[in-house]
Image: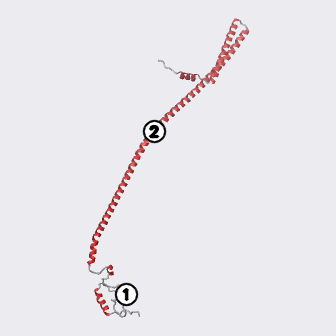
């Protein structure tokens, strides 16, 4: 089965194949013109030759020689025109080859650029996938280490808090125990203090029944009522009472030894 070629492709190829440069067109025209002129001159040469063969006249021979000379010039001109056409075609072929090569290079460049873009996109995608995977792995490792560190801190804080709570509970129990023991011992201590012989407490000295040094107010009030020298019996009674009192005897008052001080008149 014959291969079917599209009209557009065929027309494009025909145009590119038949397209010629202006120099080639000009040289081709010169060749065509020289060929036409030479053909016309060759017809004249043939006629002049026929006339010269019929008659040996000098004019016929001169006319044939002139026609041959002109035909020779036209052949040289045609040869030159053909040479110019060959040169033009050669240069045109070079230009066409150059244009074709340039077009091919441009096409290859576009193809390579497109291919490079696709390969770059694929490479970037692969690199991105690898980079993301590596970063996720590194981040997971860092998060795991951070979680472990945070867990250790939480455990340490919990342990410290538990120890502190335990210490506070221990202190609270000791305090409660001490207060309980103190509350149990307090009534017994009071009872023992009441029955215990010995020197009474300072608070008990203020009572009226306690024997000992009289109050200053009482000693000052007595001389106001008494006139003159105090009685001996009072001094004797105070002297008798003094040994019965425990502790150091008072320095002033009725129990004072020696002559009492003089009273004001």
Where 247 falls versus 100 (above or below)? below
Residue 181 image position (x, y, % from top left)? 28, 69
- Which of 92/160 is in front? 160
Q: Residue at x 30, y 90 (%)?
A: 237
Residue on which disc 2 sits = 125
Give the mark toward the camera: 1 or 2.
1
Which element type, helix, strand or loop, lies under badge 2? Answer: helix
Q: Secondary structure at mark 1?
A: helix
Q: Is residue 216 above or below residue 61?
A: below
Residues marked 1 and 2 touching at CB (< 8 Å):
no
Residue position for label 1: 221
Q: Position of residue 245 (x, y in %)?
A: 29, 85
Comes first in the chain, label 1 or label 2? 2
Residue at 27% from the left image edge and 75% from the top image edge: 191
**Mark 2 neighbour density, 10 Å: few (under 14) some (14–19) many (20 or more):** few
Residue 168 position by quadrant: bottom left
Residue 193 in the figure: left or right of residue 26: left
Q: Quadrant of the C terminus?
A: bottom left
User: Where in the figure is residue 109, as x and y percent of width and height?
Assistant: 53, 32
Q: Which mark is residue 9?
A: none
Q: Where, by quadrant of the figure, is residue 244 drawn?
A: bottom left
Q: CA distance from mark 1 to mark 2?
A: 119 Å
Q: Quadrant of residue 133?
A: top left
């Amino acid at each position: 089965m014959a291969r079917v070629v599209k009209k557009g492709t065929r027309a494009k190829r025909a145009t590119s194949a038949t397209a010629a440069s202006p120099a080639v067109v000009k040289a081709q025209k010169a060749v065509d013109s020289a060929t036409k002129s030479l053909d016309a001159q060759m017809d004249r040469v043939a006629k002049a030759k026929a006339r010269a063969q019929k008659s040996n006249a000098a004019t016929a021979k001169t006319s044939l020689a002139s026609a041959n000379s002109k035909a020779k010039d036209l052949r040289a001109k045609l040869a030159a025109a053909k040479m110019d056409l060959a040169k033009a075609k050669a240069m045109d072929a070079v230009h066409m080859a150059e244009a074709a090569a340039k077009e091919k290079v441009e096409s290859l460049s576009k193809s390579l650029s497109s291919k490079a873009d696709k390969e770059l996109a694929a490479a970037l995608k692969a690199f991105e996938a690898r980079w993301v995977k590596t970063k996720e792995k590194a981040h997971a490792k860092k998060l795991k280490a951070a979680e472990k560190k945070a867990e250790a801190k939480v455990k340490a804080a919990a342990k410290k808090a538990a120890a502190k709570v335990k210490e506070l509970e221990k202190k609270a129990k000791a305090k409660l125990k001490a207060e309980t023991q103190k509350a149990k011992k307090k009534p017994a201590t009071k009872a023992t203090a009441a029955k215990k012989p010995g020197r009474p407490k300072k608070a008990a000295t203020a009572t009226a029944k306690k024997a000992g040094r009289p109050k200053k107010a009482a000693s000052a009030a007595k001389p106001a009522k008494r006139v003159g020298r105090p009685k001996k019996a009072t001094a004797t009674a105070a002297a008798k009472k003094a040994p019965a009192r425990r502790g150091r005897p008072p320095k002033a008052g009725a129990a004072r030894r020696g002559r009492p001080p003089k009273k004001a008149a």
